[in-house]
Image (cartoon, rainbow, N blue to C red):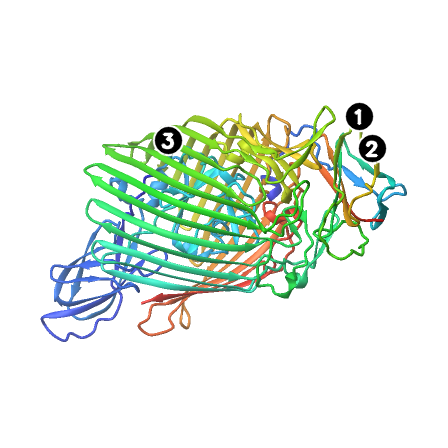
């Protein structure tokens, strides 16, 4: 996938500060600071180059030029990815503080090459709705998991599993209908499972590109509802070093977290490294007991017992850059262990001899462990007007679920607690070329992916399988005239899925029609090789008129059926159902029309992004009205689905300091055929809105740029349900936060502080799309969190 | 404000959004919580099921709870015997369709507790599904004795 190189630049020079008396006629010292115009954050690694003098800004953004001859001196200030600017400074004495404000703004850069344009400009020109999420957004809104952080974006919601895990949902679609891509490589884990989240260290994520809309053209299978694309972090500047340590404490689940990262660069070689560790206890809900279908679970001190967990992540990368080649290789490992609520695992109510309440910090059965190891390489080669991108990836994903062994149906009591094990090795190769030909930007490429999936444990859900997919795509972005862009593309994919057979490890008494019975090891999955292919396409127009952007895009996206959809044939005791796959499922295909209008004015912004979507064969796990033994049979079926919805947002700045933002999102889904005709889809998010008020109070004491934020979220009642869901009452919840930089020590870069109170009123409410909603568990109660970011100088 | 943004529901056909119900809370309902069943005896298991539209099928599941792995959803809490290993527990898994559909039905199943099964704590679970695919369950702790 093409990676966009960094941005253009507009440079303002403020020469504000004191001039000391001249000490000599020959040369002077100039000290200064390079900062980002929007965030006021110091920029490390910017180079300041004059005729006979040279400096690089340090991690705090400061630089010193020595022996600068007097007179009008010309500087070239450049920061990687930004176009260089020349600046003239009149030097007649030592200068102690020149503040150089670098502003990234594409709108004033007409006629710059595509790859010199800012992310924002590129996002505006792309007819597909793309939201660029900055590092500042990530830091200001950081929650317990990556997707919870991103759920502030209108149209993005999550499926939460307890306090530390979440799955992405875009406009009501999740699981394998959203692609997650990191460093150009599609993140492959057990996305289909409902009880575990995304295995990515959110501290490794510097920026995110959220694509709302059909994106199979570029991202292949699964990018039906959208993509969470996590590009590699920006390359550090030459001769730079920076680092920081983040400390986090939370009161609701007594979380302690630490994440430390460093990054540095010589001239051409650069590296990054990060270690993250988090440990948390059972989380607390504003309820003394849980009432679930006649069962009553008393909670000890309002703790949701056995939901504690831990996470340990490490990552390292090394990169090389020169004029026409940039290559970076990443190594990362994410490990997590999470407990599941002890009283009911899924829908299965459990009693246990385990004394769960002796400690809120330990993780007893049931729990799961996941590990995700990844090596990726991104190489970009520029030859004349061609930009070649090659992404290589290897991922080893492992997940093990443990629960107390109990006999079920014909299954005797297993010997150990290892109920399920999933291993997945994924090999990925993406290669693409982007060619700028006058007003056309032509791109084409291939995506290859091979997966080996194996299973273990005594509980069968999906068979082992091998999957191979290959896709080829081409598109053209045509600049009709500045501000008016057409984009169209076509893609072909081939997929092969080879399932292995599986037999029960225990015998079942089978009654035959002739009255006899026998004891048999039942076959749950058959060995089969299935082939799929699909053509996807996308076409759209974007029109930029001053500060307003208009977009319209029509796309077809697809998804190859999953192994569980094709080949399940077994009991899922946690969900109290028998799941039956169908080998004749077609690839899911979806047609979507998106319109996006946004306006970014001075002190005012407005956006509206409606969409209409049609699936001709949505794969749906249908609860039937028949039994297998005594469990309800759920069978995968395909039905036509119509969806309509969108997001609106508006905001204004008052008195220069008070920002008020309002956003809302809604999606309406209908199955138009099949056994659940007239019903919605599972996990439909309710109509919701967010009112956010931010106030920048100005510096005081040692606090720099403090910002106070109040978020008021309102969700309507969700009556749109499909069996076996329950409707969920609406709610209102208030979150407050205060974020500031602190100048604590002289000559030391500022320390970041963030204080946040979530669910201020300890409101008892239910989130329709949370995993534990199924058993009537409310969302977490009040939480106070304190985060400190300490720079390593 | 949120109400104004919502779409009106023009296309809702007659959608069944109600679960069926299942109950043993009437005189003849059987077994009641903490009921004691004798080996070799025959009992009529009875439960009343209803639905707003059409009933489809029901099931009865009896399995041992010697390891105390679960408990029932009745108001009474039964005294459980000591935890023990199963050697030849009573396991019953039966399902039946309700051919006539209808909105109300009484489950009546004649069952004999086998002579040779382990005595001890058992778990008895009824389930009912309606024509739409909504399910309701109820579970009862019982005991099997000599």
Check if mark 3 and mark 2 are on a common chain: no
* 2 and 1 marks in contact (CB < 8 Å): yes
Q: Residues within 10 Å of mark 2 (few under 14, many from 20)?
A: some
Tell me the residue at 26%/38% (across/down). A388
Image position of B121 (left or right of A413): right
Chain under disc 2: B
Tell me the residue at 40%/32% (across/down). A469
Q: Residues within 10 Å of mark 3 (few under 14, many from 20)?
A: many
Residue B89 percent across, percent down from the top left:
75, 45
Residue A471 is tagged as 3
Residue A353 percent across, percent down from the top left:
68, 58
Question: Vertical placement of A593 versus A460: above or below?
Answer: above
Give the SS element for disc 3.
Answer: strand
Chain under disc 1: B
The residue wearing badge 2 is B105
The residue wearing badge 1 is B100
Check if mark 3 and mark 1 are on a common chain: no
Tell me the residue at 52%/37% (across/down). A463
């Amino acid at each position: 996938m093409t990676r966009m190189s960094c941005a253009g630049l507009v440079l303002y020079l403020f020469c504000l500060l004191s001039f000391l008396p001249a000490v000599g006629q020959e040369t002077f010292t100039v000290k200064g600071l390079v900062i980002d115009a929007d965030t006021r954050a110091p920029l490390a690694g910017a180079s300041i180059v004059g005729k006979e003098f040279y400096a690089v800004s340090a991690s705090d953004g400061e630089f010193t030029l020595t022996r600068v001859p007097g007179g009008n001196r010309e500087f070239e200030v450049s920061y990687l990815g930004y176009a260089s600017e020349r600046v003239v400074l009149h030097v007649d004495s030592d200068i102690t503080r020149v503040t150089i404000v670098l502003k990234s703004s594409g709108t004033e850069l007409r006629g710059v090459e595509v790859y010199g344009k800012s992310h924002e400009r590129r996002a505006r020109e792309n007819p597909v709705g793309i939201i660029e999420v900055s590092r500042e957004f990530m830091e200001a809104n950081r929650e317990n998991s990556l997707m919870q952080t991103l759920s502030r974006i209108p149209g993005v919601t999550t499926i939460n599993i307890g306090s530390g895990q979440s799955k992405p949902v875009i406009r009501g679609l999740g699981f394998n209908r959203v692609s997650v891509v990191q460093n150009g490589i599609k993140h492959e884990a057990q996305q289909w499972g409902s009880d575990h989240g995304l295995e990515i260290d959110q501290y490794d994520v510097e920026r995110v590109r959220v694509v709302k809309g059909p994106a199979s053209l570029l991202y292949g299978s699964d990018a039906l509802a959208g993509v969470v694309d996590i590009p590699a972090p920006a390359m550090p500047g030459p001769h730079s070093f920076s680092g920081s340590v983040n400390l986090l404490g939370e009161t609701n689940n007594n979380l302690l977290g630490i994440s430390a990262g460093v990054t540095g660069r010589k001239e051409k070689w650069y590296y990054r490294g990060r270690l993250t560790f988090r440990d948390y206890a059972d989380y607390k809900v504003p309820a003394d007991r849980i009432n679930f279908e006649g069962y009553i679970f008393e909670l000890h001190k309002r703790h949701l017992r056995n939901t504690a967990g831990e996470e340990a992540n490490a990552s390292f990368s090394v990169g090389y850059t020169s004029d026409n080649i940039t290559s970076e290789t990443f190594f990362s490992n994410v490990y997590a262990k999470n407990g599941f609520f002890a009283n009911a695992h899924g829908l299965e109510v459990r009693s246990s001899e385990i004394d769960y309440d002796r400690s809120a910090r330990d993780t007893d059965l049931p729990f799961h462990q996941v590990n995700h190891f990844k090596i990726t390489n991104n190489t970009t080669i520029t030859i004349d007007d061609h930009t070649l991108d090659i992404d290589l990836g290897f991922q080893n994903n492992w997940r093990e679920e443990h629960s107390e062994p109990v006999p079920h149906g014909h299954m005797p009591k297993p010997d150990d607690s290892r109920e399920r094990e999933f291993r997945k090795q994924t090999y990925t190769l993406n290669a693409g070329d982007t060619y700028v030909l006058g007003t056309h930007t032509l791109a084409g490429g291939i995506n290859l992916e091979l997966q080996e999936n194996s299973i273990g444990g005594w509980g069968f859900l999906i068979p082992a399988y091998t999957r191979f997919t290959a896709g080829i795509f081409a598109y053209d972005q045509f600049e009709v005239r500045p501000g008016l862009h057409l984009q169209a593309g076509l893609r072909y994919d081939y997929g092969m899925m080879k399932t292995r057979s599986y037999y029960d490890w225990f015998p079942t008494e089978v009654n035959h029609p002739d009255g006899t019975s026998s004891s048999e090891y039942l076959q749950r999955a058959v060995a089969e090789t299935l082939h799929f292919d699909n053509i996807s396409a996308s076409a759209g127009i974007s029109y930029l008129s001053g500060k307003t952007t208009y977009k319209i895009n029509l796309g077809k996206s697809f998804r190859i059926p999953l192994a569980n959809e094709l080949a399940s044939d077994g009991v899922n005791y946690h969900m109290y159902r028998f799941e039956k796959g169908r080998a004749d499922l077609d690839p899911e295909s979806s047609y979507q029309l998106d319109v996006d209008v946004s306006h970014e004015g001075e002190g005012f912004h407005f956006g509206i992004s409606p969409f209409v979507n049609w699936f001709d064969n949505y794969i749906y796990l249908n609860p039937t009205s028949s039994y297998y033994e005594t469990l309800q049979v759920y069978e995968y079926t395909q039905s036509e689905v119509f969806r309509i919805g969108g997001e609106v947002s508006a905001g204004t700045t008052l008195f220069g300091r008070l920002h008020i933002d309002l956003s809302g999102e809604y999606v309406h889904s209908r199955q138009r055929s099949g056994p659940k005709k007239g019903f919605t889809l599972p996990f439909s998010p309710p109509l919701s809105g967010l009112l956010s008020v931010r106030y920048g109070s100005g510096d005081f004491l040692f606090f720099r740029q403090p910002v106070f934020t109040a978020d008021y979220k309102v969700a309507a009642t969700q009556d749109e349900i499909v069996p076996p869901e329950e409707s969920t009452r609406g709610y209102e919840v208030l979150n407050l936060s205060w974020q500031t930089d602190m100048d604590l020590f002289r000559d030391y870069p500022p320390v970041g502080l963030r204080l946040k109170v979530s669910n201020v009123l300890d409101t008892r409410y239910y989130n329709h799309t949370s995993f534990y909603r199924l058993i009537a568990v409310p969302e977490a109660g009040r939480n106070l969190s304190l985060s400190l970011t300490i720079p390593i100088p | 404000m949120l109400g104004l943004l919502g779409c009106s529901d023009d296309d809702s056909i007659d959608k069944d959004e109600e679960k069926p119900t299942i109950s043993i809370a009437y005189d003849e309902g059987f077994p009641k919580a903490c009921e004691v069943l004798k080996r070799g005896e025959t009992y009529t298991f009875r439960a009343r099921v209803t639905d707003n539209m059409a009933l489809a099928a029901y099931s009865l599941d009896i399995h041992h709870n010697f390891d105390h792995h679960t408990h029932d959803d009745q108001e009474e809490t039964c005294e459980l015997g000591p935890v023990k290993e199963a050697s030849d527990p009573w396991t019953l898994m039966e399902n039946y369709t309700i051919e006539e559909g209808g909105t109300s039905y009484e489950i009546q199943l004649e069952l004999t507790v086998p002579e040779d099964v382990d005595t001890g704590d058992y778990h008895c679970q009824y389930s009912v599904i309606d024509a739409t695919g909504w399910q309701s369950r109820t579970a009862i702790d019982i005991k099997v004795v000599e």
